[in-house]
Amino acid sequence: MTQDLEKIEAFIEQHHVMTLATCGHESVSACSLFYAYDKAKRVFVVASSDDTLHIEQIRQNNKVAGNILLETKEVGKIQGLQFRGMFKANSSKEFSRLYFKQFPYALALNPKLWNIEVDFFKLTDNRLGFGKKVIWP
């Protein structure tokens, strides 16, 4: 299982944008967010304004899902990660430092930071064999 998580986190570290899916009482939404990732705590750190649809929906239901993908037309190189977790307001200076270290220009915007505490990953990696899945936990 440790080796699986290492493959997943190596993929996460190669990218910096996720698609986040949210669901409120009346509708669903998807958005793209820049992220930083804390391996030790399995937490994504993202920035978003309070006045967005996805934050409005998260206030109704903080369970989220998302994906990160490598865009390619070569079937043998397809890679994509699906994840699920809980979306929470960031209150950690450690996570804030991680985000601004990766995106220092974001400091000028003074964004509100949020955390996604991940409880499930599924990596599809066709380089390991067609349709090969690596699942954690």
Image (spheres, helix red, strand yellow):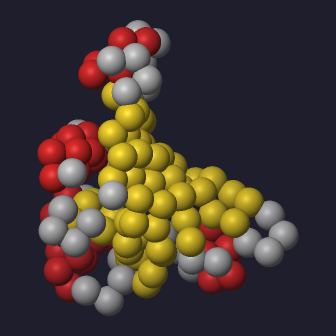
Identify the residue at the far bottom of this view: 91
The residue under the point 33% across, 40% down is 134
The residue under the point 39% across, 66% down is 119
The residue under the point 80% across, 75% down is 25
* Nearer to the camera, 29 or 130: 130
Q: How many marks?
A: 0
| Left or right: 94, with 125 as reference point | left
Is any part of residue 81 visible from this angle?
Answer: yes
* Nearer to the camera, 50 or 37: 37
Image height of 10 relative to 57, above or below: above
| Left or right: 65, with 129 as reference point | right
In the rendered image, residue 22, in percent from the top left (x then y), is placed at: 63, 63
In the rendered image, residue 39, in percent from the top left (x then y), is placed at: 18, 62
Looking at the rendered image, the quarter that the C terminus falls into is bottom left
* Nearer to the camera, 108 or 52: 52
Image height of 124 relative to 96, above or below: above
In the rendered image, residue 104, in percent from the top left (x then y), is placed at: 21, 62
In the rendered image, residue 63, in percent from the top left (x then y), is placed at: 56, 72
The residue under the point 80% across, 64% down is 27
Image height of 55 relative to 83, above or below: below
